[in-house]
Amino acid sequence: ESGITRPKGYNVSFHCNPGMEKHHFGMTHPMKPWRLTLSKSLIYSYGMSFAMDNYVSRAATYEELATFHSTDYLDFLGTVLPEPVPRDLENQNPDLKFNLGGSDCPLFDGLYDYCSMSAGGALDGARKLCSKQSDIAIAWGGGLHHAKKAEASGFCYINDIVVAILQLLRYYPRVLYIDIDVHHGDGVEEAFFSTDRVMTVSFHKYDPNNFFPGTGALDDNGPKSEHNPGAHHAVNVPLNDGITDEQYEWLFNSIIGRIVEKFRPGAIALQCGADSLAGDRLGRFNLQVQGHGACVEFCKKYNLPLILFGGGGYTPRNVARAWAYETSIAISCDDKISPTLPQHVPWREQFRQDTLFPTLEQILGEPRVNRNSQKRLQDILQHVTEQLRFVQA
Ligand code: V1S
Ligand code: CA
Ligand code: ZN
């Protein structure tokens, strides 16, 4: 008995395709599609599937992917063969077509299937919101925010988020995109650079020379070229190592609160990259499951159609905890999920502790030094507030 019941008149749909989970980027590559298996297993062990509509998503069609991606790129992606010999990390092939085949975006068996399944889940979720069959749609297999129209980048080949937002734009005049992955959501930002119908907001670690992808400075707010309606519609929140739950929540709520008030979106798309959690293999922040989840809770309070995507997340036990907690936030009214992991969870030993909310000490031993001063965070909020003067709904 999980204690989780289906709230009346409130629909959450869960979109996944188990076919995604068996793919491998390579032994040393940080992206492990298996983390989706671990997340789902925790979600199901809590009994959450009884409180949602569960769908095995389709693979997106070529035509659906072509709503954003160039056909040259899709044709190449659909025909390239996996590399027979794993490439030496230090010795990358310099003439990669569409940035495919390097160590970040390797060519592996079933690559096209993997990408189209990721986009299929996101698109199915968006369609459920458009048809009002769901209030919240969840696609943890999506969130691949770096992919460009004709280029792979940072473990992302197909931008499922852009494809899903394009679907939302058929029904909603304005869509707010929020990205809490530790990396800058550059692909989504660029895709909507010239429209005022999508506002993109990314919170990320910013260090132009030492942290991928190096873009997303505070004053990069969309091209201010003559008569670009998209000018001022990109919000960037550059952060330093070690930010805490308390600071992040304050900044997130203040910024998103002001944006929703001014931009008045008809739907919200939230990328929940779990590499912003403490202890992530690639991340740098001190966020806990509670602080990460608080962003979902805050967005849910607006009662707007909401789609949740996955994204980064390179320490699978933390990814599973965060996405399970966030699934519980999506489905629950007031009843809180048990902070103790269910008694029977497959791969129980993966989780190390039996709590959903490990402390920073449990995660890291020694937390990272926090390099975000309150003054800097206030300056960021001030900049965003001034930027919003140029935005009208
Ligand atoms: N940080 C980081 C990182 N680590 C790797 C990597 C490590 C081992 C491998 F076998 C293969 C790749 N690549 C990177 C970053 C890309 C991060 C992408 C994040 C994706 C997301 O979470 O936002 C969304 C899913 N790439 C780089 O830093 C580029 C390099 C500049 C340095 C690393 N080498 C391997 C490639 C070039
Ligand atoms: Ca981000
Ligand atoms: Zn990331």
Image (cartoon, grey):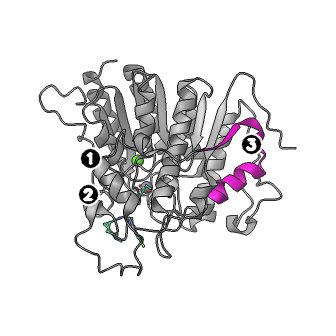
| Label 1 to label 2: alpha-carbon separation | 8 Å
Q: Secondary structure at mark 2?
A: loop
Between 71 and 382, the residue placed more toward the observer is: 71
Number of residues whose C-alpha sits closer than 10 Å to that of mark 2, classed few (under 14), some (14–19) or many (20 or more): few
Q: Which image quadrant for residue 211?
A: bottom left
What residue type is disc 2 on? Answer: Pro
| Label 3 to label 2: alpha-carbon separation | 42 Å
Q: Is mark 2 within 8 Å of ligand 1?
A: no
Q: Is residue 123 magenta?
A: no
Q: Secondary structure at mark 1?
A: loop
Residue 254 placed where, x, y %?
43, 31
What residue type is disc 1 on? Answer: Ala
Reply above or below: 32 against 336: below
Task: Indicate the quadrant containing the N terminus: top left, top right, bottom left or bottom right.
Answer: top right
Q: Secondary structure at mark 3?
A: helix
Reply above or below: 314 against 120: below
What residue type is disc 3 on? Answer: Ser
Q: Residue 381: tell me if it is visible.
A: yes
Reply above or below: 305 against 347: above
Say which residue appears at 28% left-offset and 29% top-offset.
195
Q: Are marks 1 and 2 in contact (CB under 8 Å)?
A: yes
- Secondary structure mostly taken by the magenta-highlighted segment of the chain: helix
Q: Which residue is mark 1?
A: 217
Between 146 and 234, the residue placed more toward the observer is: 146
Q: Which residue is mark 2?
A: 208
Say which residue appears at 77% left-offset and 48% top-offset.
46
Mark 1 or mark 3, which is nearer the start of the sequence? 3
Residue 6 placed where, x, y %?
77, 31
- Range drawn in magenta: 36-57
